[in-house]
Image: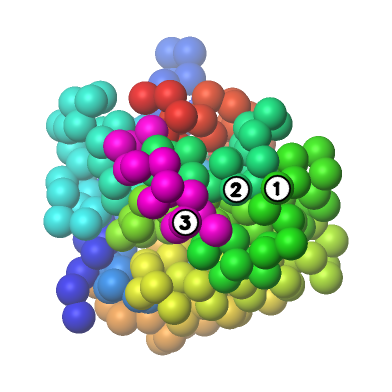
Amino acid sequence: MSKIIVVRGLIKNFPQGDQTLFILRGVQLEVEAGDTVSITGQSGSGKTALLNILGGLDDFNEGSVMVGGEELKGLSETALSVFRRKKAGFIFQFHYLLKDFTALENVMMPAYIGGMKKKAALEKARALLSDMRLDARTGHYPSQLSGGERQRVAVARSMINDPDVILADEPTGNLDPENSAAVSELLYANAEKWGKSLLVVTHDTAVAERAKFRYRLSEGVLKPEPEGQTRDVPALSETGGAAGPEGAFPEGGLRGMAANGLVS
Ligand SMILES: Nc1ncnc2c1ncn2[C@@H]1O[C@H](COP(=O)(O)OP(=O)(O)O)[C@@H](O)[C@H]1O
Ligand SMILES: [Mg+2]
């Protein structure tokens, strides 16, 4: 099996006034093609920071992050935007669908922008929406869809450019338990069907337990959950510093747009 993600000694700090927040303090991770991985952890533990780094949305201080055979350290903004479009698919808690476009158009958009012919992009989008059990909703606008349906459209969109990795940050965080279970199952099942590596950050135990490998982000490092379930990666000596205060970084719309190739 080939390794799609290899992270070694990943360190991420945020400057905070005249202080430094030490968020990721030596994260180690290996993910093979087709693996599904869940990450849990307290609010403010750095889960979003980690996914953003893996998806080329944010940079990092130290360590090595290889995704799809590409080292992300030192890539230019242009190279990162190409990386995001080709290798990473994103799903967030908020769907970031474009309100003036139908479900079908929303899904095809990143492919079309990426240079695929419109007809091919539409056909592929239709097939992905069908996989997400949305055949009867392709012509609906986001305002005409339920929360669960919008997230299923976002899942389909994340796969349109055939990414190596799908990064899902609390994808069911806004859904009731029934819709959460449905979206989660479709997300995992389709990632498996297409052989994608899937990383899901979640607070929902049921969603986390569906993954083949489970981790908890704690004190700036990833720990197998439960202990012993996950293959070992070499430990790295910890660098000091306290974890940051509680509270997640607010998710800007631009990040969702950039993640989906809609702005670079
Ligand atoms: N751009 C930023 N500038 C300063 N601090 C940040 C920034 N982004 C996140 N943080 C801080 O980093 C920590 C981890 O944030 P985050 O990754 O959003 O946590 P989680 O997703 O696990 O809730 C938090 O303490 C947050 O306040
Ligand atoms: Mg978060």
Reply above or below: 92 against 181.
above
The 10 Å Cα crowd at callout 3, few under 14, some 14 to 19, many 20 or more, is few
Q: Is residue 4 left or right of residue 71?
A: right
Q: Is residue 153 visible to us here? A: yes
Which segment is the magenta one?
113-126
N-term mark: 3 or 1:
3
Q: Is residue 256 magenta?
A: no
Q: In the image, residue 248 lies at what x, y percent?
A: 62, 37
User: Which of the 4 image quarters holds residue 96?
Assistant: top right
**2 and 1 marks in contact (CB < 8 Å):** yes
Q: Residue 136 versus residue 69: which sits nearer the camera? A: 136
Amino acid of disc 1: Gly
Disc on res. 104: 2
- State the SS at label 1: loop
Which residue is labeled 3 in the image?
A: 123
Mark seen at residue 139: 1
The residue under the point 57% across, 41% down is 105
Q: Would residue 28 be visible to someone looking at this image?
A: no
Looking at the rendered structure, the kind of residue marked 2 is Leu
For the residues labelled 3 and 2, the Cα–Cα distance comes to 9 Å
| Relative side of 36 to 183, left or right | left
What secondary structure characterizes most of the magenta part?
helix
Percent position (x, y) of residue 55? Answer: 36, 45
Q: Which residue does the image show at 38% across and 33% down from the upper left?
A: 113
Q: Quadrant of the C terminus?
A: top left
Query: Marks 2/1: CA distance?
Result: 6 Å
Question: Label 2's element?
Answer: helix
The quadrant where residue 41 appears = bottom right
Between 14 and 158, the one lying in front of the other is 158
* Nearest to N terminus: mark 3 or mark 2: 2
Q: Is mark 2 within 8 Å of ligand 2?
A: no
Q: Disc 3 residue type?
A: Glu
